[in-house]
Amino acid sequence: MTDLLTDHAFQDTYPEELSHCYGCGSSNPHGLHLRSTWDGDETVATFTPQPYHTALPGFVYGGLIASLIDCHGTGSASAAAYRAEGRAPGSDPALRFVTASLHVDFLRPTPLGPPLTVRGRIEEVKERKVVVSLSVAAGDQICATGRVVAVRLPASMAPPPPA
Ligand SMILES: CCCCCCCC(=O)SCCNC(=O)CCNC(=O)[C@H](O)C(C)(C)COP(=O)(O)OP(=O)(O)OC[C@H]1O[C@@H](n2cnc3c(N)ncnc32)[C@H](O)[C@@H]1OP(=O)(O)O
């Protein structure tokens, strides 16, 4: 389902207890398994929608596009926070982010079939907040754009560490 862009995806550095996300968790058997990495100062992921990711025949379901923007956004936020601190992704203490705000604009119908490229540009990095602007393209056509405000994982959502 997922196009493995790299062996060094941000999500590969998530600890097991934080790898259950439907969009990007490697431990979720029903999930999208989105994998994101740096491309210079931008971030990038690819994903090939399946026939059941249909909105209308031939076109991708908008909720899937929002999910790609969401998970690429939070993954990019984590990577940007590590980069801002000059630390290796995944090093402790962990810098993990959840979505505070997700905005999506559907610019044109997204064709169902070709791989989609999700790109992120880091707009702002603060200690607890990272803002990422994103695009989703089929070939050279940008079909959707988005903006994610990601905030550090709150204690109320943090799973207990493994025993
Ligand atoms: C770890 C890997 C998992 C992958 C996750 C995949 C993505 C997901 O699906 S996450 C699930 C969906 N998200 C959630 O359930 C989050 C629920 N919300 C919350 O827990 C809280 O509202 C939370 C943590 C987002 C913000 O906490 P809160 O204490 O309100 O933050 P607060 O200190 O007020 O704000 C921090 C900054 O974020 C900004 N901010 C907070 N909420 C918003 C918002 N909705 N819109 C815009 N900005 C916001 C604030 O303005 C502030 O910015 P600044 O520092 O510039 O003043």
Image: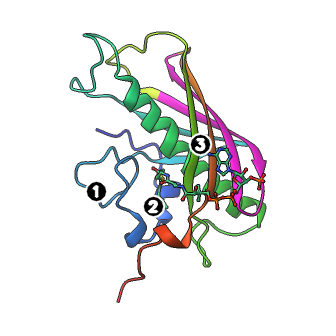
Report the mark closest to the observer, 3 or 1. Answer: 3
Q: Which residue is mark 3?
A: 101
* Dominant secondary structure (helix, strand or loop) of the stretch shown in magenta: strand
Pick the front one: 134 or 6: 134
Q: Is residue 8 visible?
A: no
Q: Is residue 158 above or below residue 114?
A: below
Question: Please, what is the three-letter code of the amino acid marked with disc 3?
Answer: Ser
- Residue 29 spot, x, y in % from top left: 23, 54
Colour scheme in the image?
rainbow
Q: Which residue is mark 1?
A: 28
Q: How many marks?
A: 3
For residue 151, which numbered disc appears in the image? none
- Residue 92 spot, x, y in % from top left: 60, 78
- The range drawn in magenta is 117-139
Horizontal relation, residue 155 to residue 17: left or right: right
Question: Please, what is the three-letter code of the amino acid marked with disc 1?
Answer: Asn
Q: Earlier in the sequence, mark 3 or mark 1?
A: 1
Question: Please, what is the three-letter code of the amino acid marked with disc 2?
Answer: Asp
The part of the image, by quadrant, that contains residue 53 is top left
Label 1 and label 2: CA atoms lie apart by 13 Å
Q: From the image, which quarter does the N terminus lie in?
A: top left
Q: Cβ(mark 3) to ligand 1 < 8 Å?
A: yes
Horizontal relation, residue 128 to residue 5: left or right: right
The part of the image, by quadrant, that contains residue 102 is top right
Q: From the image, which quarter does the C terminus lie in?
A: bottom left
For residue 12, which numbered disc appears in the image? 2
